[in-house]
Structure formats: C-alpha cells, structure tokens
Image (cartoon, rainbow, N blue to C red):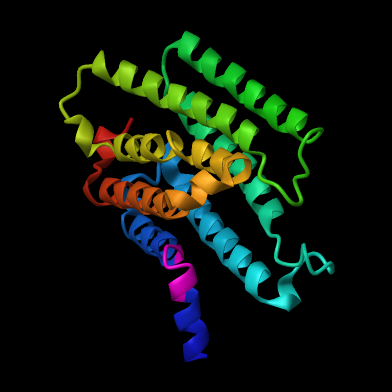
Amino acid sequence: MIEEIQNFLAESYFIPIYLATWIVAMYRYRRYFDTVMRFFPIFIMYTFLTELLGYFIKYHEEYQFFSEPEYSWHNVIIYNIYSVISFAFFYYIYWTVLKQPKHRSVVKKGACVSLLGYLISLFFQDPLHSNLYYADLIASIVLILCVWMYFKEKRSEESSYPLYRSLLYWVSLGLVVFHIFFPLIFIAAYEMPELYFEFHLHQLLLILIATMYFLFMVGFLIGERKAFR
C-alpha cells in the first residue's frame, strides 16, 4: 500500500494539487456561493476524479477499457470528454458574467465553433486513442478571447474594489497561462514527438497545471464576495 502511494505520487504528483484546490474552494465557499462560480468546486472535483481514473486505467488492468495489449493503457477518451465539458463550463461562466451584448454573442458563436471543431475532429482522429488536439486549439483560442473580453470590460468599469480582489480575475489569469501553451504541447506530442521529448514538454505541461491551480487558490483565498465579476 505504501509502495503504491509512493508510485502514485512519483508518477502523478500534480493530482493532489486538484484536491488541495478543492479543499480551499470549499473553505472559502461563502465568498462566492451566490455567483456563477458556485459550481466551481464541483468542476474541480470532477477534474480530480478524472485524473485519478486516468491513473488507474493506465496502471491497473481492472480499470482498463481495451483488451488489446497495445491499447490497454489508453485513457485518452476520458480526457476528450473532459475537454468538451471543461470548455463548455468556462464558456458558460464568461457568457454569464460579460455584460456587453456583442461580447456575449461572441461567446455563443465561439462555443458553437468549438463544438463544431470537436465534431469535425471525430472524422479524422480516433477519440478512443488520440487527443483531439486541433479542436482543443480552437477551443483554447475561443477561451482566451473570452478572458480578453472580460478584462476589457473590467478596465472600463468603475469599482470601489481592486480587480485583484475578484475570484474570476485569478481564475482568468490561470486559464490564460495554461491555454496559451496547452494545445501546442499536445500538437507537439503527436506531430513532433522528438521535439516533445527533447524539450521535456510534458514537464512543462505539469508546471502549467500547477501554476494555473495555484492562481485559482490565490483567488479563493483573497477574493471578496462584493468584488466578484
């Protein structure tokens, strides 16, 4: 049992970060329970359970989806499903928070384009064995655009609370830091594996995950209820 835990932490040391973030999110829940971010702890727990399931599929036969030896460790389908749900969740947040009709319209159209990207990818990539990384790229660009519109609206607002006191400000920073690089790393992993391994891009991906969730935790800790948006 102890050896299993040691192997788990050595292979997936970033997974406990999700659990730590969820604990902080629940501890500070009263500060945002009546905002659109009230569902965020559920999303974080879903992320944690997805990563945990991914680990068990990869390293334990009883959890594996495929009987063929070359595919037995493949867990990518749960991450493809996670990507669609994740982007939809954040699109909904920004569509709810943004005030200008033209910005809300951009979010709706961007969400449709992203969904279309995933549907088209199904004809060219096998979602059971490959990340839909080109669709992820489109969805990430749309999400970054949502964050940009959010910051643009915030700059034009007058508020008695500094921007850094808003939970969504820190969440937005974390999303930008991660999604600028995340799809490019996956494209390199599949299309340029030599580059992927030479520059240790997998480790960079884990660092980006840790950075994003650290920024989330900062938002939960210093965010104020009245400063939200």
Task: Specify whether 226 is left or right of 81.
Answer: left
Asked if 32 appears above or below 108 in the picture, the reply is below
Please say whether residue 105 is visible from this viewpoint.
yes
Residue 153, picture quadrant: top left
Q: Is residue 13 magenta?
A: yes
Say which quadrant the C terminus sits in.
top left
Residue at 51% x, 36% y: name it. Answer: 184
Task: Specify whether 75 is left or right of 105.
Answer: right
Residue at 52% x, 24% y: name it. Answer: 142
Residue 156, picture quadrant: top left
Q: Nearer the viewer, residue 10 or 83?
A: 10
Residue at 30% x, 39% y: name it. Answer: 170
Q: Position of residue 48 (x, y in %)?
A: 51, 61
Q: Position of residue 199 (x, y in %)?
A: 42, 48
Please say whether residue 96 is visible from this viewpoint.
no
What span is colored magenta in the figure?
Answer: 9-15
